[in-house]
Image (spheres, helix red, strand yellow):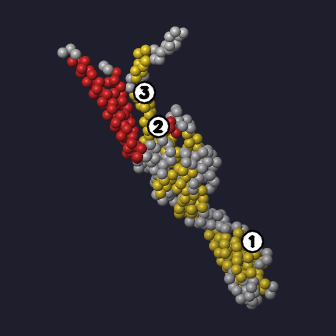
Amino acid sequence: MLRSMNSGISGLRSHQAMLDVTGNNISNVNTTGYKAQSTQFQDTLSQITQGAAGGGAQVGGQNPAQIGLGVQVAGTNTNFTQGAAQRTDVATDMMISGDGFFVLNKGGEQILTRSGSFSFDNQGRLTSPDGGIVQGRMAENGQLPAGGALQDIVLPPNMAVGGTATTVAQVQGNLPSDAAVGETRTLDREVFTDDGTSQNLSLTFTRTAGGWDVAGSLGGANAAGTLDGGLTVGGVAVDLTAVTTFAGVDSASISSQNGSAAGVLQSYTMGPDGTLTGRFSNGASIDIAQIVLGQVDNPEGLQKVGNSGYALTANSGGVNFAAPGTGGVGSLVGGALEMSNVDLSQEFTNLIVAQRGFQANARIITTSDEVLQELANIKR
């Protein structure tokens, strides 16, 4: 058989592979986080018909004579450039602005992905559409750990936080200096114990010949004091320094206190550093978890495993974990997704190139067939 026949066949196979890669890119033009691939060709072994010879005193050197045996696919490269952002305004949608991958736990296997389309399941776990659980670090008592093993990001249903005890109460406003001796003013304010139990703080101001005295009661405890000295009742320090005593104005009130009741989760936000912060019904704002990103030494060495995921290989190197915006990884953009980086104009051009290459190699085969036919006809 002619060598050109085999070369043409190898060309058909290689350009068919190029068509396959290009078609896959076009089909994923709207796939979140998809990274386009390109096909690389290389020639196969060449048959040496005449070896090289060095030059002598009377004879010049000779170059080797070689005939190529076709083409083969050297590999496919993945283009990890940033895709365009698409706003979704969904709180759990996230986009990585820069390098790095989201880390998922899928059936015990660690999967990397650039697709940030997440949602919470019935157990409060942040998951990908195919069931992978987003990894990060959970806060303890509102404090995020600096390192440690990765954990599932969980936002428990009906999550609650305990209350905080009231230690300070602030009184503001004016008590009238022209009030008659013996007149009283009573102010009440809800305060809280360590476990968030509600109590009533009652302050009674009494006009005396020398000014205003104050007495307080809280949970069975009683105390007395003056406007200048203040008072502490039941462990709550009452600040009276802002109270004035002008004539004709009666506006005193307990303006604030620093305790709170227990609260339930009402909403949450995702910061650019991956911190998931919960906002509770008692006004508390507490860090719940932090998403961690992964970075590999050679992203092009990753293996695609479907569902926009990648797995480590021997040539990708290990994965390093870092909080978004640190350690060389990008920051997070909430309410947005990274779109595919497929360039349709380039892909359609590649279709034409692959088609013409396929046609040219098919012509090699038909021409070689005609030559063989002529050889077969010599015997006639």
Q: Looking at the image, is mark 2 or mark 1 earlier in the sequence? A: 2
Residue 284: % across, % down:
60, 63
Which tag is nearer the camera, tag 2 or tag 3? 3
| Residue that label 2 marks | 77
Residue at image location 43% in from the left, 36% down from the top: 39
Q: Farthest left residue?
A: 380
Q: Residue type at mark 2? A: Asn
Q: Residue type at mark 3? A: Asp
| Residue that label 1 marks | 232
**Residues tagged 3 and 1 counted as in contact (Cβ below 8 A):** no
| Residue that label 3 marks | 43
In this rendering, the answer to whether 188 lies above or below 208 is: above
Residue 226: % across, % down:
78, 78
Determine if residue 285 is in view.
Answer: yes
Residue 353: % across, % down:
37, 38
Residue at image location 56% in from the left, 42% down from the top: 295
Q: Is residue 257 left or right of residue 26?
A: right
Distance from the alpha carbon under mark 3 to that under mark 1 = 89 Å
Q: Residue type at mark 1? A: Thr
Q: Farthest right residue?
A: 210
| Closer-to-camera residue (176/7) | 7
Q: Looking at the image, is mark 2 or mark 3 earlier in the sequence? A: 3
| Closer-to-camera residue (10/243) | 10
Q: Is residue 162 left or right of residue 12?
A: right
